[in-house]
Amino acid sequence: MIDALFEYEFLQNAVITGLLIGLVAPLLGVFIVVRRLSLIADALSHITLTGIAASLLIEKRVSAVNDWNPMYMGMAFSVIGAVFIEKLRKVYKHYEELAIPIMLSGGIGLGVILISLADGFNTDLFSYLFGSVTAVSRDNVWVVVIITTLVVLIVMLFYKELFVLSFDEEHATIAGVNAKTIHFLFIVMVALVIASAMQVVGILLVSALMTLPVAAALRMSVSFKQTIGLSVLFGEVAVVTGLFSAYQLDVPPGGTIVMSAVVILLLSILYRRLRSEEWWKGETS
Amino acid sequence: MVQEPLIELEDVAFKYDKEWVVEHVNLAIHKGQFLGLVGPNGSGKSTLIKLMLGLEKPNKGHIRLFGKSVKKFNMWQEIGFVSQKANSFNSGFPATVYEVVRSGLVSRMSIFQLFNQKHKEKVYEALKEVEMEEYAHYSIGELSGGQQQRVFIARALVSDPSLIILDEPTVGVDSEHVTAFYDLLGKLNRERDLTLLMVTHDIGTITSHATHVACMNKSVHFHGSSEDYHDMTDEEMSEMYGHSIHQLSHNHEVTHS
Ligand SMILES: Nc1ncnc2c1ncn2[C@@H]1O[C@H](COP(=O)(O)OP(=O)(O)OP(=O)(O)O)[C@@H](O)[C@H]1O
Ligand SMILES: [Mg+2]
């Protein structure tokens, strides 16, 4: 693959995008997981799919439009969906998590209709669902570069606010943190990252890249910083091994990336087991 | 010179749903006071504190902090808070004691400011006050409930506030540390002129440490110095606590006569 990497632009695109996503997806994932909002990523990814379906349909039906990049419409839908989720969470104050299945099923429902109208499930769509090593264009790479830079910058600048909000929302409010604005900023970032990740990882599996590396990191980290560091490390390892094996086996990278993340997760659980056993033995002997 | 009270409530009333939980509350806490707020379960103590902190909005009345309406108040770095549910946070949260205490500095920092060496020293100072510095790099979830509570007290202390509000901070803390904790509060109150408002059920201990006591049951029935509180008669006491305790003290009298 290394030789091919120098030769083919599409492979470079996939690898660059993959590495950037491997950084930002787990980075945001840490905050999502500790706030117990793991399903938000799922809801948003399904809404992104709706946006892609809408884009494909318009391209098909409106002859003036061709060569649209479905990523943009996916992104727009994802961001609008994020805003709706925040609104719904306010409506169902005591059942905040209800917002997620509402948006998720609404997204799929509309998505299925649009997909059928757009002539059903073709290979294009398949690559959006499960990712592709060949579908990423140079333009897309640039969009992902910009989004990654923005997300990393915002997380660094608002690190202390994001931390207090995740740890203790009441305390954050008393500390004068503008919870509403930060929540909004955060969920928009999640929406953008999901839409950027879809071409490599696929819509159906992007939420896994946001949560599985974090789940593994939680098994072995003590501090919040460490959790972020390990999550990103695991995310990158999963992306690299996943892309490599997808190319070798000629399967969609979404599957191999997620399976690599699953293996990492299992190893982390095993590691924890072994360590606590060792500790236990050391304690008794 | 008469100073403006740090906290001032004027005929405050509040309800979550239909029933009034707090009614006709007038209360002023002045600089340098250590006020113990007592009252039976469900008497609205925690609610009153949420109102003071702007976490809930009163249906009636006015609340002022440092002379400013709570709606417009923005000097949150002057107020530390230890909540009653401090130990019901997500115990699997991956953060060290150090990180948790440091988060108490956020109110003092400007928007894009990053943590620096000075902040680190502050954190260790606060941890030292509650005797938790050796636990700085423990995960918060690994500590016992009482230890966690001490960490949350350190988080309130770290920003050098001039007022600290504590809602039953000693629940789950062992008696040795409770004593140490009251001593610490007393010391901060005297030496740093820290104003304190503390909700507690431990009437015996609070009256010997606090300078003032307020008793509430929906509204404030007694507010005065600790000495005045001790001088209260049985009748006054039972009137304040309402019907159930009235009967209790009545029975009490019967057995003695
Ligand atoms: N979030 C809420 N929604 C609705 N009602 C509430 C809420 N919180 C408290 N209450 C009600 O308000 C009343 C006062 O509650 P509050 O927590 O202020 O009492 P408290 O004096 O702090 O009691 P405790 O000593 O048990 O801590 C109670 O009757 C309670 O049922
Ligand atoms: Mg209470």
Image (spheres, rainbow, N blue to C red):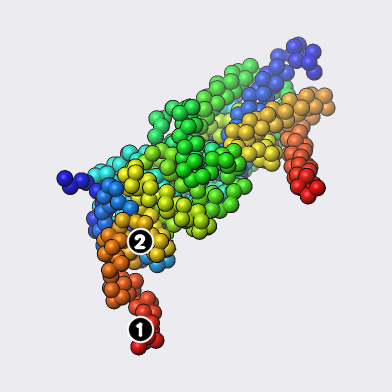
Residue name at image x 27 percent, y 60 percent = B225
Camera-side residue of B211 and B27 = B211
Q: Residue furthest right?
A: A249
What is the x, y in percent for residue A71? 59, 27
Residue name at image x 69 percent, y 41 percent = A219
What is the x, y in percent for residue B123? 48, 36
Q: Residues within 10 Å of mark 2 (few under 14, many from 20)?
A: some
Q: Amino acid at mark 1?
A: Glu
Mark 2 C-beta closer than 8 Å to ligand 1? no
Q: Which mark is residue A162?
A: none
Label 1: element kind:
helix
- Among numbered discs 1 and 2, the one appearing first in the sequence: 2
Camera-side residue of B103 and A23 = B103
A249 versus B103 height, above or below: above
Q: Tell whether B144 sits left or right of A170.
A: right
Residue with the mark numbered 1: B253
A122 versus B213 height, above or below: above
Camera-side residue of A282 and B161 = A282
Chain of the residue where label 2 is placed in the rendered structure = B
Residue name at image x 29 percent, y 42 percent = B72
Residue with the mark numbered 2: B207
What is the x, y in percent for residue A14? 69, 21
Label 2: element kind:
helix
Mark 1 C-beta closer than 8 Å to ligand 1? no
Q: Residue furthest left?
A: B1
Q: Quadrant of the N terminus of chain A?
A: top right
What is the x, y in percent for residue B47? 38, 57
